[in-house]
Image (cartoon, helix red, strand yellow):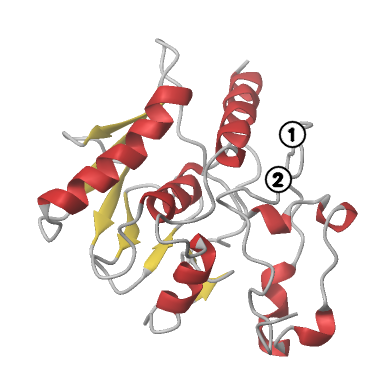
Amino acid sequence: MESRASLSILALLLGFSQALYLTQPDGEDITTRILTINKGSSEVLLEGDILAKRSRNALVCLYNNCFWKKSSNGLVKVPYTLSSDFSSSDTTVIANAMASFHNKTCIRFVPRTNETDYISIKNNDGCYSYVGKTGGSQVVSLSRLSCVYYGVVEHELNHALGFYHEHVRSDRDKYVTINWKNIDPATTSNFDLMNTKNLNTPYDYSSVMHYGNTAFSINVTD
C-alpha cells in the first residue's frame, strides 16, 4: 500500500515538474544560471547542483527510501527552516515557489517545529540540494545574490523532494542526442542515465528539471 501511495505521489509530482517554466523573467535559462553560479561553489556537486552525503550515494533516490512520507490526511508535509539572512522580498519569492507545489500537488512545505527530518534553506555559496530525504537536517542552498528566483527555487525544492534532472531519465536517448564530442571529458558523468521510474509521463524538453542544450559543452554553442 505504501509503495502504491509513493508511486501515486511521484506520478503527480512528475507531471507538476514538467509544467514549470524553464526561464526567468529576464529570459535567462534557469539551468544556465545554476551551473554558472555553482562553478564557484566550495561543495562537490554532482550534475552541477546535487549534494552527496558521505554516508550514501547521492543518486540512489529511486524507490521509497528517500521520499517524504504521506500522512493519514493524504498530504506530504515537508518541514523547513529559513535562514534569517533572507530579506522579506527573498522570503516572498521562496514562499511563492512553495505555494506552486501546494496549489497543484499534495506536497505541503511547513515551518519546522520539532521534526527530526527537515530541509534547512540557507544563504550558502550556490544553488544546490540533496536528492530526496536524507534524514535529519538537510541543506537547500539558495544564494541570495544569485539563486532566489522562482524557477531556481522550484528546481532545488524538486531535488529535495527526490527528483533528478530530466536529462538523466532512463528513456532519454529516445528523445535527446548527446554531442559527446563537445562535452568536457571531465563532466561526461553528468549525463549518466538513471534507472528512473517515469510512470508513463512524457519526456519534457521544457521541464524546470531539464538542463539547457549547451550544458557542460566545450564551446557552449553545439
Amino acid type at circle 2 is Asp
Q: What residue is shown with label 2?
A: 204
Q: Residue at x 72, y 58 (%)?
A: 168
Give the structural element (helix, strand or loop) at label 2: loop
Q: Nearer the viewer, residue 12 or 21?
A: 21
Relative to 98, does residue 169 appear above or below in the rendering? below
Tell me the crowding category of disc 2: few under 14, some 14 to 19, or many 20 or more residues within 10 angstroms, Cα based: some
Picture coordinates of residue 17 (x, y %)?
Answer: 56, 40
Amino acid type at circle 1 is Thr
Picture coordinates of residue 25 (x, y %)?
Answer: 40, 55
Q: Nearer the viewer, residue 215 or 67?
A: 215
- Res 82 visible: no
Relative to 16, does residue 44 appear above or below in the rendering? below
Labelled disc at residue 214: none
Q: Residue at x 10, y 55 (%)?
A: 84
- Res 146 visible: yes
Q: Is residue 21 left or right of residue 146?
A: right
Give the structural element (helix, strand or loop) at label 1: loop
Q: What residue is shown with label 1?
A: 201
Rendering quarter of residue 133: top left
Which residue is outermost to the top? Answer: 73
Picture coordinates of residue 1 (x, y %)?
Answer: 63, 15
Picture coordinates of residue 179 (x, y %)?
Answer: 83, 77
